[in-house]
Image (cartoon, rainbow, N blue to C red):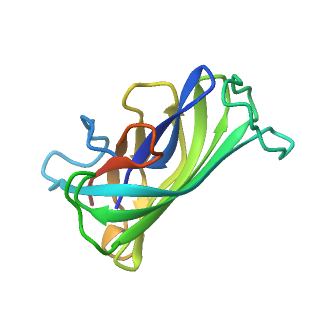
Amino acid sequence: MSHSHCIIRRAGAASVVVAMTGAAVLVFAGGSASAKTTTLHFFSKAVSNSVFQANGQPITNQNAQPTPGDYFISTDVDYVGNHKKHAKTSTGSDNLVCTFTTNSMGICDGVVAVGGYVLLANHVTVDLTANNPVVTINGGTGPYKGAHGTLSATSVGSSGNSDFTVAYSN
């Protein structure tokens, strides 16, 4: 959350949001009509992505259908820009943990760290099979305190990386 982005990956029959990146169409959530929306764009390089059964055992079958209680953890390093043109040095990182409540919906907690502060997605419901899943931002620290908005990501091929967009206002 992991700037902010959501990476969409394929896990069995369901597409799964496994990171927080995106250059997808955003839906702004929250804030007042007069609040200024800030948009951040990142290229998110996958560091680790793992899917687990509810009992903590790794799921290694990429075609397995998720069941309630299964969860995934995704961690990325984020670079300002997109997969075609981005900074050489990372400026942030993100982590997303989602637990499936059905085979398509989940409760997610995410953190996007940028500049020593974080944007938060605390215990938000996400449609994990949506073409452009959106994770709701509902807090942060420092200049992101009281932030509301969205994180979305678009996968870059089968690399596990993504283009990630964060849109927020305070």
Q: Position of residue 68 (x, y in %)?
A: 74, 28
Residue depicted at x 38% and y 70%: 92
Residue depicted at x 26% and y 38%: 26
Q: Position of residue 11 (x, y in %)?
A: 60, 30
Is residue 96 positioned above or below 87 on the image? Answer: above
Instruction: Please indicate whether residue 118 sits to the left or right of residue 149 in the image.
Output: right
Q: Position of residue 76 (x, y in %)?
A: 48, 59
Is residue 64 positioned above or below 139 on the image? Answer: above
Instruction: Please indicate whether residue 100 sits to the left or right of residue 27 in the image.
Output: right
- Is any part of residue 113 visible from this angle? no
Instruction: Please indicate whether residue 141 sits to the left or right of residue 87 in the image.
Output: right
Residue 49 or residue 17, whichever sits in front: 49
Q: Position of residue 63 (x, y in %)?
A: 67, 24
Q: Assign the N terminus to one quadrant of the image.
A: bottom left
Instruction: Please indicate whether residue 169 sits to the left or right of residue 145 in the image.
Output: left
Residue depicted at x 40% and y 75%: 117
Residue depicted at x 34% and y 77%: 115
Residue 33 or residue 135, whichever sits in front: 135
Tell me how many marks there are.
Answer: 0
Is residue 110 positioned above or below 53 on the image? Answer: below
Direction top: furthest residue: 13
Q: Assign the C terminus to one quadrant of the image.
A: bottom left
Residue 102 in which image quadrant:
top right
- Is any part of residue 167 visible from this angle? yes
Residue 29 in which image quadrant:
top left
